[in-house]
Amino acid sequence: MPAPALLTPRQFLRLSIGLLAPCLLLIPFFDQPLALFLHEHCAPARPFFEALTSRADRLHDLSKTHLLGIPLIFLALGLGFILCRWVLRSPAAGLFLVLLLTHELSMVAARVLKGVLLRLRPAALFTGSYHDLGFWHDAPHTGSFPSTHTAVYCSLFVPLAVAYPRHRLPLLLFPALIALGRLILDMHYLSDVLFSVWLVVLFTFLSGQLAQLPALAGSQPALVPATVED
């Protein structure tokens, strides 16, 4: 079985530019017009995305059930890393570690930034309650930037898509639908979603570098750099 791949610095830089540069244009110029357009034209799609998000949230809540004082999802990923690293001697060990760290750090970072930036959600825009970019409002309907839902679900699939690039399209379909749903449901602006994806990419990259340390990787690399062709 080939070792799972990790993001190279060059790939991380390209993805960072591709995700952060649009945010600089979206926030002052395009976020609000796009949100208004989706609000006016995408109402028929809302039931589908409401149901999809609700089911995903129920499953994720189940994965956070505590066993031995630890959420099941982190317990499973941690045990997967230990089993693959010290018992099976599998190159997949690093992937379990990357998934664990990326998932936790992406969620924490998104929630911290929400509390600091206090961006109003599109729902407040539609009521005419503000006329600026929506940041630093101590009012209801804050918490738009960045999107926690996007961070949660992308952090479970983006590391897999990086590790197995031949299967990246089916692996990214579900988190892409969740991210699109945040726009259709008037919960987030596009920049909120793109920045959350960048957080996931950031922690996927940093966790992949950490997984390469000899103390964690062992005698063989837990992950290998992705090839240019991938």
Image (cartoon, rainbow, N blue to C red):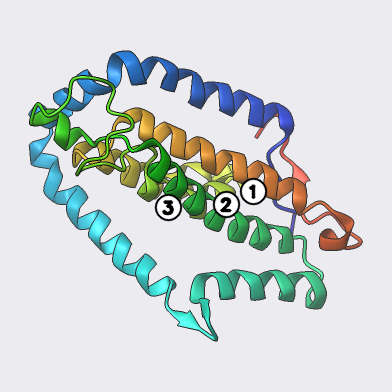
Residue closer to the observer: 166 or 6: 6
Position of residue 110 in the picture relative to residue 123 (left or right):
right
Nearer-N-terminus badge (3/2): 3
Nearer-N-terminus badge (1/3): 3
Position of residue 89 in the picture relative to residue 34 (left or right):
right
Q: Please identify the quarter of the rendering in which residue 59 is found.
A: bottom left
Tell me which amino acid carries mark 1.
Ala
Mark count: 3
Residue 84 placed where, x, y %? 74, 71
- Kindly tell me whether residue 170 is visible in this rendering: no
Q: CA distance from mark 3 to mark 2?
A: 12 Å
Q: CA distance from mark 1 to mark 2?
A: 5 Å
Tell me which amino acid carries mark 2.
Leu
| Label of residue 153 in the image | 3
Residue closer to the observer: 229 or 105: 105
- Crowd band around label 3 with a 10 angstrom C-alpha radius: few (<14), some (14–19), many (20+): many
Q: Residue at x 42, y 22 (%)?
A: 23
Where 127 falls versus 147 (above or below)?
A: above
Q: Residue at x 53, y 40 (%)?
A: 199
Q: Which residue is mark 2?
A: 160
Secondary element at image label 1: helix
Q: Which residue is mark 1?
A: 163
Where 27 falls versus 203 (above or below)?
A: above
Q: Please identify the quarter of the rendering in which residue 97 is found.
A: bottom right
Q: Nearer the viewer, mark 1 or mark 3?
A: 3
Residue 166 placed where, x, y %? 59, 43
Q: Confirm or deny contact between disc 1 and disc 2 (CB under 8 A).
A: yes
